[in-house]
Image (cartoon, rainbow, N blue to C red):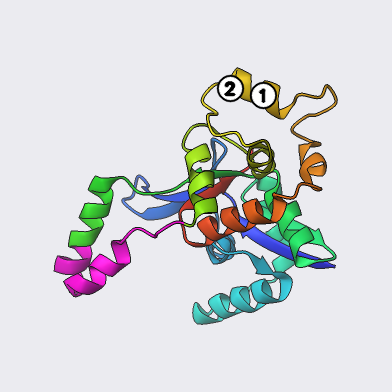
């Protein structure tokens, strides 16, 4: 059985009453201040999809680099963050099955920074960090999207959709999904369909692998973050 893991949500640096900065995880409108090991685990999964062995290796390496010794196992931290809604795992007998179980109920959210923030970061790299301009330009150059990726981003910029709903939209050739009422009527046209069983319904779709691949590629390239509502 293959298991794969990824992180949910995003983080912000907050300043406490003593002027100390600390990270806060944010997902589905809930916030959580992680301890150091939880933050190491979460950050090792953000914009990554790792299997069990890869995660064990990366987590152990990060703890060793920071000289962290504790009595809790990786499984303990995974279970804790999963229950809190900041980590998700998927399992299956093939890599596609595991990835589909991981991604199907999740909501990909475009994560592209606004222009002022990108411009500030560009000047910070050049004038404060001494990064050559040609290198900074390459860092901030927008990726050229493939056709399937363009289709996914076009849908996600209109409304919130789970990966399973994206598969259903592409399967039906839907492009205009601005109207929530009309969209729900099309996606859940059969009375027995719900957001809980839609993944099982689209599992046989011929568009499953192209959509799953596009969503995963966009996520790994840091153009999306994942939420679970």
Report the label total. 2
Label 1 secondary element: helix
Q: Position of residue 3 (x, y in %)?
A: 77, 65
Left or right of 52, for residue 68: left
Depicted 30 relative to depicted 135: above or below: above
Location of residue 164 (image quadrant): top right
Pick whichever, 115 or 203, lies toward us. Answer: 203
Left or right of 190, for residue 65: left
Outermost residue toward the left in this view = 127
Left or right of 148, for residue 193: right
Depicted 54 relative to depicted 204: above or below: below
Instruction: Examine the rendering and report whether any part of residue 144 can be seen.
Output: yes
Q: Residue at x 76, y 24 (%)?
A: 189
Depicted 165 relative to depicted 121: above or below: above
Q: Please tell me the numbered disc located at residue 184.
A: 1
Instruction: Examine the rendering and report whether any part of residue 80 can be seen.
Output: no
Classify the position of the N terminus by image quarter: bottom right
Asked whether 144 falls inside the magenta stretch, the response is: yes
Pick whichever, 177 or 46, lies toward us. Answer: 177
Q: Position of residue 73 (x, y in %)?
A: 72, 69
Depicted 142 relative to depicted 25: above or below: below
Left or right of 116, for residue 182: right
| Few, some or many residues within 10 Å of mark 2 (<14, 14–19, 20+) | few
Q: Please tell me the numbered disc located at residue 180.
A: 2
| Few, some or many residues within 10 Å of mark 1 (<14, 14–19, 20+) | few
The CA span between labels 1 and 2 is 6 Å
Q: Position of residue 86 (x, y in %)?
A: 61, 50
Q: Position of residue 227 (x, y in %)?
A: 58, 44
> Where are the magenta residues, as a range?
124-145
């Amino acid at each position: 059985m293959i298991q794969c893991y990824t992180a949910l949500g995003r983080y912000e640096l907050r300043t406490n009453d003593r002027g100390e900065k600390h990270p806060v995880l944010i997902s589905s409108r809930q916030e959580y201040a992680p301890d150091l090991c939880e933050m190491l685990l979460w950050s090792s999964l953000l914009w990554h999809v790792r299997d069990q062995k890869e995660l064990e290796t990366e987590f152990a390496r990060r703890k060793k680099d920071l000289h962290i010794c504790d009595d809790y196992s990786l499984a303990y931290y995974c279970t804790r963050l999963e229950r809190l809604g900041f980590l998700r795992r998927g399992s299956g007998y093939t890599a596609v099955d595991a990835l589909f179980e991981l991604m199907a109920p999740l909501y990909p959210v475009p994560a592209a920074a606004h222009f002022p923030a990108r411009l500030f970061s560009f000047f910070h790299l050049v004038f404060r960090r001494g990064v050559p301009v040609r290198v900074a330009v390459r860092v901030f150059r927008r990726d050229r999207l493939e056709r399937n990726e363009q289709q996914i981003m076009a849908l996600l910029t209109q409304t919130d959709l789970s990966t399973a709903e994206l598969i259903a939209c592409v399967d039906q050739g839907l492009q205009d999904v601005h109207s929530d009422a009309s969209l729900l009527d099309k996606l859940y046209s059969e009375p027995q369909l719900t957001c809980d069983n839609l993944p099982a319904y689209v599992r046989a779709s011929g568009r499953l692998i192209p959509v799953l691949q596009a969503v995963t590629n966009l996520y790994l390239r840091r153009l999306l973050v994942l939420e679970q509502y």
